[in-house]
Image (cartoon, rainbow, N blue to C red):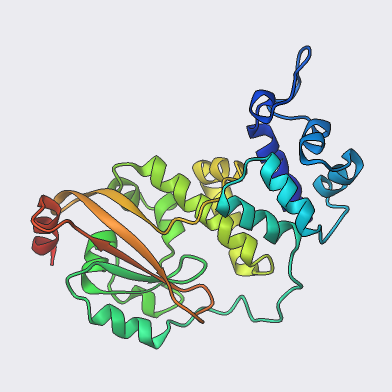
Amino acid sequence: MSSELGDFLRSRRDAVTPAAAGVTSWGPRRVPGLRREELAQVAGISVNYYTRLEQGQSANASDAIIEALARALDLDDDERVHLYELARPVPARRTRTARAEVAVPGALALLASMPTVPALLLGRRNDVLAWNRLGHALVAGHLAFTDPQDPATRPNQMRLLFLDRHMRELHRDWAEEAASAVASLRYVAGQYPDDRALAELVGELSMNSRDFARLWAKHDVRLCSSGTKRLHHPQVGDLDLHYEVLHLPDSNGQRLLTHTAEAGSAAADALALLG
């Protein structure tokens, strides 16, 4: 994870211009953003200590150091949380992280109780643990409804997004959707640095999708919890749907993804037709 910290710091340092940081720049520059010594000056820490951080030679930085770097790099809330997770990693969890996740029973009952709302239950690695009938019809009608029930056939939202042409065609703003998905996966990866299956997923996607590899290398971090999805469904056409991600307590990262349409809208009519 020390290399992850260094990569993240360099990516954020490259994104801050000297003018934005209030640094006077003299002569030609070989870096797009701040130099190490400039960031250290703005953050009020020694250049040697910052260099050790970037090179992974110093662990468990203090709150004051992390906050100073977050301010100097102008990090948002999600990026600040991610910086803490990388700079102060927890000891490796003694968990069976490679074992397939099991859907929370209460979440399955909730899915079944909302037949008019397209919904999916996602695991922390973006495996589709379950979906209701309308959720399945909306996002992956070309797959079998029973696929999530067996770990061997269980779809993964990230694999679908980057490796399945049906999913790529479903999103009218695929590039924006892909960037948000990767930034969210970065956030999760910082929380579970010891999850081997998650690391294998990242490696697989990096090998098989140039788009994923490019986005992953940017080190953008964002916890996407709500917004609008602009879809083009092969059966009912264009839909603009509001989505919410509901994180389930005590579920080890499982969450519900719901889609709703504005009452009386064309999207609402399309969902009714799809149902």
Count numbered badges in the picture: 0
Which quarter of the picture shows residue 92? Answer: bottom right
Q: Is residue 144 above or below residue 157?
A: below
Give the camera-side residue of 257 and 236: 257
Q: Say if residue 199 shows up in the picture.
A: no
At x 42%, y 59%, the residue is 225
In the visual, does 179 lie left or right of 229?
A: right
Give the camera-side residue of 259 and 77: 77
At x 83%, y 52%, the residue is 56
Identify the residue at the far bottom of this view: 105
Query: Residue 164: x, y in percent?
Result: 38, 53
Query: Residue 42: x, y in percent?
Result: 77, 35
Give the camera-side residue of 90 and 105: 90
Query: Residue 26: x, y in percent?
Result: 78, 14
Identify the residue at the far top of this view: 27
At x 44%, y 55%, the residue is 224
In the visual, does 83 lie left or right of 138?
A: right
Check the picture and name the quadrant holding the N terminus: bottom right
At x 84%, y 46%, the residue is 55
Q: Say if residue 163 shows up in the picture.
A: yes
Give the camera-side residue of 205 and 112: 112
Query: Residue 178: x, y in percent?
Result: 43, 47
Identify the residue at the far right of this view: 48
Which quarter of the picture shows residue 204? Answer: bottom right
In the visual, does 225 lie left or right of 202?
A: left
Check the picture and name the quadrant holding the C terminus: bottom left
